[in-house]
Amino acid sequence: MRPKVGVYVCHCGINIAGTVDVEAVTEFARQLPNVVVARNYQYMCSDPGQALIKQDIAELGLDRVVVAACSPRMHEPTFRAVVQEAGLNPYLFEQANIREQCSWVHEEGADTTGKAMRLVAAAVAKASLYEPLEEREVGVIPAALVIGGGIAGLKAALDIAEAGYQVYLVERENHLGGHMAHLNKTFPTLESAAELLSQTISQVREHPNIKVLTASEVIEVEGYVGNFTVRVSRRVSESTSQRVGESAGQREIALVNSSPDDSLTLEVGAIVVATGYEPFDPRLKPELAYGIYDNVITSLEFEQLSSPSGPTGGKIEVNGQQPKDVVFIKCVGSRDKNLGNEYCSRVCCMYTAKQAYLVKKQIPDANVTIFYMDVRAFGKGFEEFYDRVRMEGIRYRRGNASEIYRKRDPNVGQGRLVVRVEDTLLSETLEVEADLVVLAVGMVPRHDAKDVASLLKLSRSPDGFFLEAHPKLRPIDTTTDGVFLAGTCQGPKDITDTVAQAKAAASSALIPLSRGRVKVESIISVVNQEICSGCGICEELCAYGALSLHPWKGVMTVNEVLCKGCGACAAACPSGAMTLSHFTHDQILAQIDTLVV
């Protein structure tokens, strides 16, 4: 029986309709083979747009649906849910991308509309050959792993534990707190970072559902959403292990296995990655003389200098004397194309304002100057704090620092520091003397981010941070089901946003844990064992460990739970024995035949 296809073309406001003749595409779709109805609507993803599809499925008996709109990454789950609610198998839906692949990359005209028509025709040809796929579920281990013991990991662990689930918190260092442990005050409220952090650490240490593993590192992760097997290496001696256990409330680790090589095996249903960031190394900008002069320091070093627990007891001093002229240089390592760090680190503007404020409060007669590219006070209370800082007499000058050198004084030899700056408002070069220069360093990905990405099969964005599944709709999910991102491992952010994302990651992790069962990928590889030669090429290419050679049949087998449907095996198979469901050879060839006509 011939399929009955419905085609729906989205205007997407003017995103598509501004360059594509939507009416012409709709009329073209009506003439395609197997198409029963073709319509267009302003926003197909809206409730009225979804209602159109449901109504036609019910009244016209549609058994295939094609929506020509934006990227499938944006709304494919939305439309699959729509056809499922109307009684169809969700995998009988196909989405043609006529926005990112057409209207956004071409100018208005007949060629652009013609391309949209071909994309719709290809989608209809493929959808006509679709077969229903079975949605599958697996059980979930009621425990979670949190990697990283900074504020993000701590908050995520607490939320999951409070919901009644076991949490294993793994921290590479021998203490908890991450970078927040090195901060003095928080902005814009000037609260003690140590007090806020110590409260959270105490809650984690004392929680009966949290097992803390410090001086430990995740070295292997196997399995799939709901059923991960994780091996953790512990870099501690037996006596240190006892102390760690005692500090965690003298609790035994509930472990599946403990091997002689100081590695532990854990079984969990969800993983939260909160591995954090590293501060930019200003030695990569040698013109700023960091590491050459002891009174050129980083912003994190200033935090220690101004902290009551720091080396000077909180007194801001340079070589035993209070500085009279203090210069802050912002955006060191951020917004710098030469270094490849084109992003804004988001925290530098406000922590610089905070640090300058602390200098002025402790040394009222000090001359404090901040050289900046732009001031970005975007958060709640940030603009007010920025105004408060300026009212203290702190001088903001828009300029780029080009060099720091020590002035030669004929009376004393080496004299004070000189900061050479291009004033970008006046278009002139300035030279400002200083007793102390603070470099506002930005955030960069951890040096081991590549290893962690490989371990958990995570993607990374061009800036090197871990990549979320979708920047708008799935900002804490990853392409690996059951693995979630929290904090600055995903990108630069302040404590407030870090905690918010950590709590969101915990909430997402709790979904599979609380349900007890989770859906796994339906689009998977299938082996035709009659023509499989057992060459093993596909097994070597599989990034998910889903393929293995049958021990006595000598043919490839697929672990349907581990398979993620990437298609690498089907593309590489020399005998054509591997097929990816929903992307079969016949379906792909049907698309190609339609496009080249």
Image (tube, grey):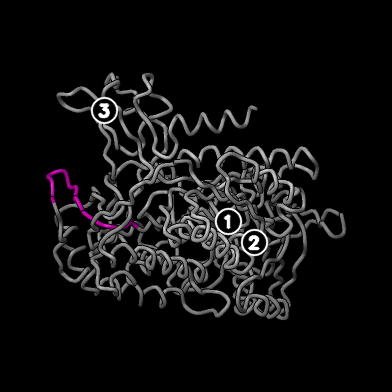
Is 301 located above or below residue 264 in the figure? Answer: below
Q: Residue at x 41, y 78 (%)?
A: 195
Question: Alpha-carbon distance for marks 2 and 1?
Answer: 40 Å
The quadrant of the picture occupied by the N terminus is: top left
Viewer-side label of 1, 3: 3
Residue 564 is situated, as x and y percent measured from the top left of the image, at 37, 43
Which is nearer the eye, 100 or 95? 95
Q: Is residue 268 shown in magenta? A: yes
Residue 372 is situated, as x and y percent measured from the top left of the image, at 72, 61
Question: Alpha-carbon distance for marks 3 and 2?
Answer: 45 Å
- Counting the numbered discs, the total is 3
Residue 233 is situated, as x and y percent measured from the top left of the image, at 24, 48
Which is nearer the eye, 143 or 390? 143
Q: Which residue position is annotated with label 3? A: 556
Three-letter code, disc 3: Met
Numbered range of the magenta stretch:
257-271
Report the side of 58 relative to 238 (left or right).
right
Report the side of 352 relative to 111 (left or right).
left
| Callout 3 secondary element | strand
Q: Main secondary structure of the magenta part?
A: strand
User: Which numbered marker is on residue 511?
Assistant: none
Residue 475 shows up from this direction: no
Viewer-side label of 3, 2: 2
* Dot 3 alpha-carbon crowd within 10 angstroms: few under 14, some 14 to 19, many 20 or more: many
| Callout 2 secondary element | loop
Q: Which residue position is annotated with label 2? A: 43
Is 529 located above or below residue 85 in the figure? Answer: above
The quadrant of the picture occupied by the C terminus is: top right
